[in-house]
């Protein structure tokens, strides 16, 4: 496995100097959040980020996320222009040596939580999701962009997007995704890039918006729709693990040839559609991280892996879920699992 951590750029309170102190780090996952969905990641912008990482001794291992615009997802008039821009960005990333590109196809929102600082029994805080609490969201004033979102929206923009996405439905959203893949996968193949589709987070419909990347059947359908090694998956154990019906070790084994990137996250399920995030330690939550890693390594999967959302420990102030302390501890757990497996196979 290629061990990485995510860095959001200059808006990230965690510095590259601090990341340098994490043992066994092979590279950094980063993006260009100042370029809105539909825009081109230019060679100059990519080179500036690559150089900045290199000056601190890091390779830019994964681009996360190259945002897919709502025009592409929902079929707006700018769709073809935005697909062309996405393809140009792929080529530019490949030219700079970035060969794994993470993206998602969740309408309107990327991942969402209802609590960003839930107090846990150990005194730390973590992000949480309670399905009933969605009813408390008031979108009339819009929503500011969260760190991992492509952009924020005004109230009027959200109302229009909700209306379009709800009318679209899951089947047409799938058609839009497969049309997108038909256009971009040949470019990825030519450029030597692996695309890594992130699952829905949480893996069920929210606000009556369609979701299509939530379980094994949905993922299998997408991978087969455009059957190419370049059409890959981000295997996010937290997103998929929030649903008790998802057998993560079995899914890891089944999709191993198409897994291009791994998000290792642990969650504790507290209801059918309720969960909160916990330490990466195998005993902390309901995700069988050891089982997942064993299946992946047994299948010969050797791709970038990063510890995903962690708790906030010891008063750290950072982007919710992206404090360095718990992610660094989590990386140590993951490195230990991988080292133990490799020793057992020697």
Image (spheres, grey):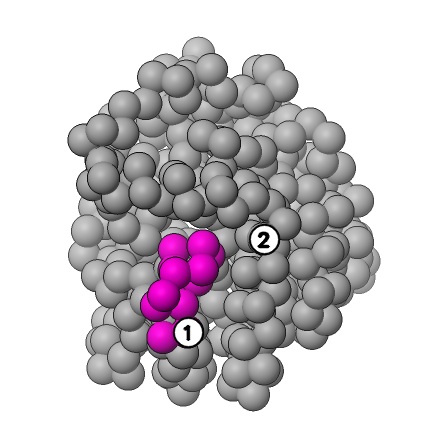
> Foreground: 36 or 294?
36
Looking at the picture, does residue 329 appear above or below residue 231? above
Q: Residue at x 30, y 40 (%)?
A: 158
> Foreground: 207 or 246?
207
Mark 1 and mark 2 in contact (Cβ < 8 Å)? no
In the picture, the disc for residue 14 is none
Per the image, the residue denoted by label 2 is: 172
Q: Helix or strand or loop: what does disc 1 sit on?
A: helix
In the picture, the disc for residue 80 is 1
Q: Position of residue 265 (x, y in %)?
A: 54, 39
Q: Position of residue 111 (x, y in %)?
A: 43, 40
Q: Helix or strand or loop: what does disc 2 sit on?
A: helix
Looking at the picture, does residue 37 appear above or below residue 310? below
Q: Residue at x 40, y 40 (%)?
A: 163
Q: Position of residue 255 (x, y in %)?
A: 74, 56
Q: Quadrant of the C terminus?
A: bottom right
- Graded by Cα atoms within 10 Å as few (under 14), some (14 to 19) or many (20 or more), the crowding at tag 1 reads some
Q: Quadrant of the N terminus?
A: bottom right
Magenta-span inclusion, residue 160: no
Magenta-span inclusion, residue 77: yes
In the rendered structure, the answer to whether residue 244 lies left or right of residue 157 reads: right
Looking at the picture, does residue 62 appear above or below residue 319? below
Q: Is residue 54 visible?
A: no
Bounds of the magenta span? 70-81
Q: Residue at x 58, y 36 (%)?
A: 203
> Foreground: 169 or 58?
169
In the rendered structure, the answer to whether residue 181 lies left or right of residue 91 reads: right
- Disc tally is 2
Question: Which of the 4 quarters of the picture holds residue 17?
Answer: bottom left
First reached walking from the N terminus: tag 2 or tag 1: 1
Q: Is residue 69 visible?
A: yes
């Amino acid at each position: 496995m290629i061990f990485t951590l995510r860095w959001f750029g200059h808006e990230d309170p965690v510095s590259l100097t601090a990341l340098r102190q994490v043992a066994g780090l092979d590279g950094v996952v980063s993006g260009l959040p100042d370029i809105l969905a539909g825009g081109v990641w230019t060679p100059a912008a990519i080179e500036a980020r690559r150089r900045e990482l290199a000056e601190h001794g890091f390779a830019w291992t994964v681009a996360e996320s190259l945002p897919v615009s709502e025009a592409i997802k929902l079929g707006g008039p700018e769709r073809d222009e935005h697909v062309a821009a996405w393809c140009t960005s792929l080529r530019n990333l490949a030219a700079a040596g970035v060969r794994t590109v993470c993206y998602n196809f969740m309408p309107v929102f990327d991942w969402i939580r209802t609590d960003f600082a839930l107090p846990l029994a150990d005194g730390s805080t973590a992000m949480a999701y309670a399905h009933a609490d969605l009813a408390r969201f008031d979108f009339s004033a819009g929503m500011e962009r969260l760190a991992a979102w492509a952009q924020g929206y005004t109230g009027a923009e959200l109302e229009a997007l909700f209306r379009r996405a709800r009318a679209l439905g899951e089947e047409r959203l799938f058609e839009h995704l497969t049309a997108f893949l038909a256009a971009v996968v040949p470019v990825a193949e030519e450029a030597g890039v692996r695309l890594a589709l992130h699952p829905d987070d949480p893996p069920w419909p929210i606000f009556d918006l369609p979701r299509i990347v939530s379980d094994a059947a949905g993922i299998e359908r997408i991978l087969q729709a455009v059957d190419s090694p370049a059409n890959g998956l981000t295997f996010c154990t937290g997103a998929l693990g929030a649903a008790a019906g998802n057998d993560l070790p079995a899914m890891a084994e089944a999709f191993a040839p198409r897994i291009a990137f791994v998000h290792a996250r642990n969650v504790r399920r507290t209801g059918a559609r309720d969960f909160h995030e916990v330490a990466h330690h195998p005993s902390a939550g309901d995700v069988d991280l050891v089982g997942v890693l064993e299946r992946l390594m047994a299948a010969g999967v050797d791709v970038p892996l990063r510890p995903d959302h962690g708790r906030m420990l010891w008063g750290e102030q950072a982007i919710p879920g992206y404090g360095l302390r718990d992610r660094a501890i989590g990386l140590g757990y993951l490195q230990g699992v991988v080292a133990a497996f490799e020793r057992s196979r020697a």
